[in-house]
Image (cartoon, rainbow, N blue to C red):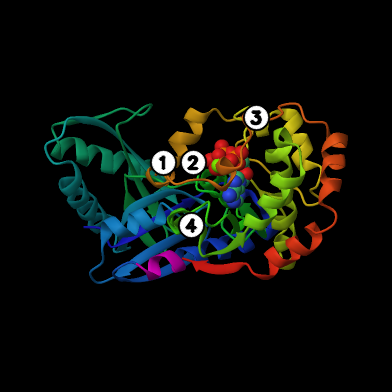
Amino acid sequence: MFQAFLIKYGEIGVKGKNRYVFEDALVARMKQVLYHVDGTFQITKEQGRIYVEAEGAFDYEETVASLQRVFGIVGICPVVLVEDRGFEELSRDVMEYMHRMYEGVTKTFKVHTRRANKHYPMDSMEVNAELGGRILEQFPGLKVDVHAPDILLQIELRSHICIYSEVIPGPGGMPLGTNGRSMLLLSGGIDSPVAGYMVAKRGVYIDATYFHAPPYTSERAKEKVVDLAKKVARYTGPIRLHVVNFTDIQMYIYDRCPHDELTIIMRRYMMRIAQQIAEDTGCLALITGESIGQVASQTVPSLVATNDVCTLPVFRPLIAFDKEDIVSVAKKIDTYEISILPFEDCCTTFVAKHPVTKPQVERIRRSEQALSEKIEDMVKEALDTREVIQVR
Ligand code: ATP
Ligand code: MG
């Protein structure tokens, strides 16, 4: 029944003179996702509205599902688009629409007309009243409720006329690419994919760095991270995944530093390396899945000690989230089932029995001096030998 969709977008609407930048980014991203859907689509922008029209047959479910992954979209309305051929024709089209959508149902409704075409011969109140009356006559199950109707039948009078009553929720947020690019520290856990998703939702393109420690972490553990990146990329567009071999650095830290400080020192090196890659590849900030108090390395003093080596801003969107809330986002974006697969993490192999929970930055810096002999070269080696995987 539907050949077209009206796209509602929220916050972009208030961006003043820059509005077209946001709209263009939104349209560009919609084109990208629809490219992979069965069907041929036209996307048009007019008077603060974006329409998607399908030419001929198309996969309705897949179209809606794809648009539901486009940041910036607040609502997807399946619409019937008709030419303006006078009110009687419009009335026939509306009754036809109501028959197909609501035949035999018992519900309340309201008609809401927007008259963007200022030359339309009736005003919006007249259209509401006239159509409302005819619907009441033809549909015994429907009653009017102007305050909280079950069905809000919307009629937009423009150069063509748009009839709809359904709004399928979109993800919200801002269109991708309107806020530069950032580097996600992506592990195989539950949190970091969610963190990447959340920052991307604000319009930020994502690249990712994964620290791999063969043979302590297997090829399967790396595949798991690639699979997670693929899931996230459904929302964020292509992700360049940098896989850094971290084994030698970890071993060296293990040999030379106090074991209760291992995790913190390792995390400081992860940040340093990710930051270097970020700077080399045009990323403006780092993103992690850290959340206050979740583990010893995420107490506030531990976060302070880790952050000590960062010169780029670090976005930690989950900082005040409980695990439960993170899990519910992970389920929504379909990363959860992959995240809980049991593959070893590079940190678990070397983790101390009693890690510090109140590290002192000065002491950590002093402990790191034991690494000074070789660590620079090892970091350079890790950067130079990284593998870059294009995930889409
Ligand atoms: P996650 O569920 O995201 O793995 P976590 O609760 O296991 O997080 P940590 O292992 O302390 O927590 O890691 C905190 C953050 O550090 C992660 O969210 C991620 O951003 C980053 N991180 C941890 N391990 C790695 C890794 N091997 N490669 C890349 N980033 C990592
Ligand atoms: Mg982890």
Task: Point out the tag, 2 or 1, that comes first from the N-terminus.
Answer: 2
> What is the spatial separation of the Cα atoms under label 3 and label 1, in whole angstroms?
20 Å
Task: Point out the tag, 1 or 4, that comes first from the N-terminus.
Answer: 4
Residue that badge 2 annotates: 190
Q: Is disc 2's CB within 8 Å of ligand 1?
A: yes
Residue 340 visible (yes or no): yes
Q: Position of residue 79 (x, y in %)?
A: 32, 55
Q: Is residue 112 left or right of residue 372?
A: left
Which secondary structure, mark 2? Answer: loop
Q: Nearer the viewer, residue 147 or 58?
A: 58
Asked which quadrant contains residue 302, the reply is: top right
Q: Inspect the image, locate mark 2, and give the three-letter code of the amino acid beneath it.
A: Ile
Give the extent of the magenta segment. Answer: 31-36
Residue that badge 1 annotates: 340
Which secondary structure, mark 3? Answer: helix
Task: Point out the tag, 2 or 4, that comes first from the N-terminus.
Answer: 2
